[in-house]
Amino acid sequence: MTTETDATAPTEPVRFDTKIAVLLRDDLQPWQRLNVTAFLVSGIGSEVPEVIGDPYADADGTAYLPMFRQPVLVFEGTKETLTAAHRRALSRSLPQSVFTSDNFTTGNDRDNRAAVRAVPGDQLDLVGLAVHGPRNAVDKVLKGARMHP
């Protein structure tokens, strides 16, 4: 396996044919936005391993964990925008992770999963979702959403 140093790396911009996007409900508190985003993107990384890049290392040789190899775009929208995006992602069979308002009341992964499982998909009180897929498909899923400020 060969790696490029910064001095030998290509200078043209990298354009990805896929997109990772997070859609947050616009009425969340700042701490909730950060918390929900962190949880949601962890789902994408675990199910779509090809989006994870190589590990990092500094000049001293200290190793750091790998991260996404492409940007994560964060959007916001109304409750209705999230419901529509969820439906569109399902209809396109795109991998997605969801976070519901009920997840704020639980304290662990088991109870989070149980809270989602207790509600039919079309009745989930979504506060966020993350989706990965071809750029144009993700753009269609996010119709009506706006970039997070």
Image: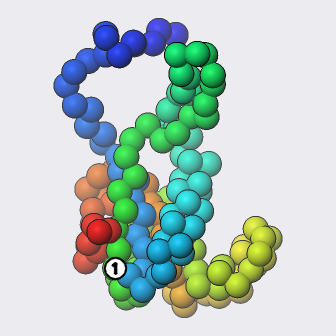
Residue 131 appears in which quarter of the rendering?
Answer: bottom left
Q: Is residue 75 left or right of residue 34?
A: left
Q: Is residue 128 above or below residue 37?
A: below
Question: What colour scheme has been applied to the protein in the rendered image?
Answer: rainbow
Q: Is residue 10 left or right of residue 47?
A: left
Name the residue located 50 percent from the left edge and 32 percent from the top edge. 53
Residue 27 appears in which quarter of the rendering?
Answer: bottom left
Residue 17 placement (x, y as % from top left): 30, 42
Nearer to me, 107 or 1: 107
Residue 11 appears in which quarter of the rendering?
Answer: top left
Residue 138 placement (x, y as % from top left): 33, 60
Q: Is residue 53 above or below residue 115?
A: above
Name the residue located 47 percent from the left edge and 74 percent from the top edge. 30
Q: Quadrant of the C terminus?
A: bottom left
User: How many discs mark residues in the rendered view?
Assistant: 1
Residue 78 placement (x, y as % from top left): 36, 85
Question: Callout 1: 10 Å neighbours few (<14), some, many (20+)?
Answer: many
Q: Is residue 28 left or right of residue 47?
A: left
Kind of residue indicated by mark 1: Gly
Nearer to me, 67 or 61: 61
Name the residue located 56 percent from the left edge and 60 percent from the top edge. 38
Question: Considering the numbered disc 1 on the image, is that residue within a helix, a strand or a loop?
Answer: strand
Nearer to me, 112 or 8: 8
Residue at the limit of the structure toward the front, as seen here: 60
Q: Is residue 109 left or right of residue 145?
A: right
Residue 25 placement (x, y as % from top left): 42, 80
Can residue 87 be seen from the camera position used here?
A: no
Q: Is residue 98 above or below residue 66?
A: below
Give the residue at mark 1: 77
Can residue 43 be seen from the camera position used here?
A: yes
Name the residue located 66 percent from the left edge and 79 percent from the top edge. 103
